[in-house]
Image: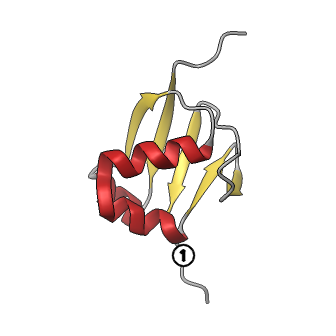
Amino acid sequence: MAEASEVLVRYFASAAEAAGREEERLPAVATVGHLRAVLVERYGEAMTRVLASGSFLVDGVVSREDSRAVGTRIDVLPPFAGG
C-alpha cells in the first residue's frame, strides 16, 4: 500500500484561532514531532503556546508523544479545563 501524500489536520478552539482555520491538508509527515515543527513554523508563537499544553488525536487516541506515527488525519487539541 502506498504512503499517504498528505495529512488532514483539524484544529479545535484556540488551535483553530492560532491557525486561522478549522482544517487544512498538509504534505504528509512521519511523526507528531515533525507535524509540531511544521505547525510552529507556519503559525508561530500563537501555535507554540497552544501546543505547549495541548495534545494531538491520532487514530482516535490522544497523544503528546513526538515519536507517535501520523496517519492520514490528526486533530490538534488545545488544553481543556477540568471540572
Decide which of 71, 38 is in the foreground and name it.
38
Asked whether residue 13 is in view, the answer is no
Residues 37 and 46: in front is 37
Q: How many labels does the image show?
A: 1
Circle 1 crowding by C-alpha within 10 Å: few under 14, some 14–19, many from 20? few
| Residue occupying the point 52% across, 27% down | 28
Quick check: 59 above or below 66? above
Residue that extends furthest to the left in the rendered view of this protein: 20
**Res. 63 visible in picture:** yes
**Between residues 35 and 78, which one lies in front from this camera angle?**
35
The C terminus appears in which quarter of the rendering?
bottom right
13 with respect to 7 (left or right): left
On the picture, is 25 further left or further right than 17?
right
Q: Which residue is drawn at 62% across and 32% down?
A: 30
Above or below, 26 against 53 in this view is above
Residue at 69%, 55% (x, y): give it. 65
Q: Is 37 displayed left or right of 69 in the figure?
A: left
* x, y percent for residue 24: 38, 37
Query: What amino acid type is highlighted by mark number 1?
Result: Phe
Query: In the rendering, at what x and y percent does residue 54 appear?
Result: 53, 66
Query: Residue tagged by mark 1?
Result: 80
Tell me where residue 16 sits by quadrant.
bottom left
